[in-house]
Image (cartoon, rainbow, N blue to C red):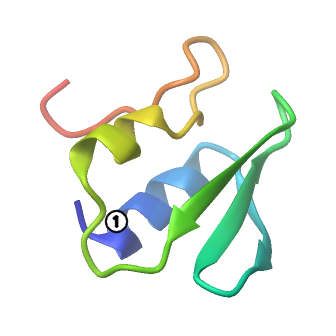
Amino acid sequence: MKRLDLERKLRMAGCYLKREGGSHSLWTNPKTGIIEALPRHAEIKEPLARKIPTHPATGKVKLPGE
């Protein structure tokens, strides 16, 4: 999954960028309080994209085709 697509999904789910680190961006889900590190690669592997908690009920990203 493209990083920009994942960032768009995070914003749509109510998450926000907390800060930029050396090689990762830290995203916060205000509904759960979970902070997740997102690497700064053009492509993010699907298992990591699924792991990032954005959906308040399930804690999972809704990817296309799910």
Residue 3 is drawn in which quadrant?
A: bottom left
Specify few, some or many for label 1: CA neighbours under 10 Å numbering under 14, 14-19, or 20 or more: few
Circle 1 residue? 5
Q: Residue at x 24, y 45 (%)?
A: 46
> x and y percent of residue 61 in the render?
43, 35
| Residue farthest toward the left in the current orientation of the protein | 65
- 30, above or below 58, in the image: below
> x and y percent of residue 22 in the render?
68, 87
58 left or right of 44 in image:
right
36 left or right of 28 in image:
left
Q: Nearer the viewer, residue 35 or 11?
A: 35
Q: Residue at x 59, y 36 (%)?
A: 54
Q: Residue at x 24, y 71 (%)?
A: 43
Q: Secondary structure at mark 1?
A: helix
44 left or right of 51 in image:
left
| Quadrant in which the C terminus is drawn | top left
Q: Nearer the viewer, residue 43 or 11?
A: 43
> x and y percent of residue 32 in the render?
81, 27
